[in-house]
Image: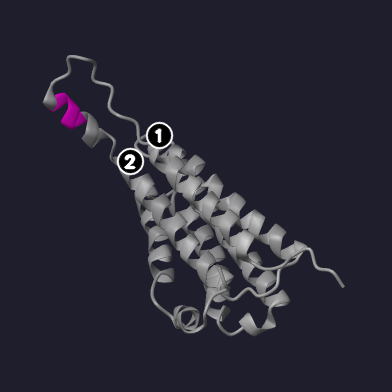
Amino acid sequence: MVSFFKGPNRLEAFSDGVFAIALTLLVLEIKAPNIGEHGSSAALWAGLAHLWPSYVAYLLAFMTVLVSWIGHHIIIGQVKRVDPVLLVANGFFLLTVSFLPFPTSIVAEHLRGESGSAAAAVYALANLLNSAAFLGLVRAVVHLNPEATGPLAASGRNALLGLPWCLFCAGVAFWSPVASLLLVAAMWVWWMRPGQEWQAGAARPGPPG
């Protein structure tokens, strides 16, 4: 039987391109202070300091995309077979990654104002969507590549726990937007810790280039 899906190489290349574009779009949300042609150095420093929500939003979103890329790299390292379901699951995950510049811009614009709680809640819910898509991708890979069940167990468990955690962060946003953002960041820091899936990925050679 002829298979139209030869391996994960094109899937990985396309995904890396989407990640690169998403990271580029994040930094475009940081705008230079508008102090006019004759603005003083003090005005420029004050304008740069005033942009602190943009810096916070950028760092958080960059961390989100970075950890998503690391997780995606671990997943693709376990893929030996590809089918339409896996391609769709990967596409939906990339959709959630490429969407992140939008909630990032909302946080940068509204964190200081009365709508800061809503902005932080939107960011937490965007991360919830990203976690759900990552979980779906893990399950699609494991369904088609059963030998990946063990190496990807921790990744799937982290994504599953991320769903209620992001909901909790969205609720915290209405008490403290900054605390909500920090709790979302804590989730990504936790996911970045080396674990069994990292060791499995290092021990097992990836697909041929």
Q: Give coordinates of residue 68: x percent, y percent.
A: 49, 61
| The stretch drawn in magenta includes residue 44 | yes
Q: How is the image coloured?
A: one colour
Per the picture, the main secondary structure of the magenta-coloured stretch is helix
Q: Give coordinates of residue 43: x percent, y percent.
A: 16, 24
Identified by mark 1, the residue type is Glu
Residue farthest along the front direction in this orientation: 209
Marks 1,2: beta carbons within 8 A: yes
Q: Residue at x 17, y 18 (%)?
A: 39
Stretch of the chain drawn in magenta: 42-46
Q: Give coordinates of residue 207: x percent, y percent.
A: 58, 73
Using the image, tell me which numbered label, if any, was put on residue 53: 2
- Residue 24 to residue 204: above or below: above
Q: Residue at x 39, y 48 (%)?
A: 177
Q: Residue at x 38, y 74 (%)?
A: 193
Count of all numbered marks drawn on residues in the image:
2
Q: Which residue is mark 1?
A: 109
Secondary element under disc 1, as helix, strand or loop, is helix
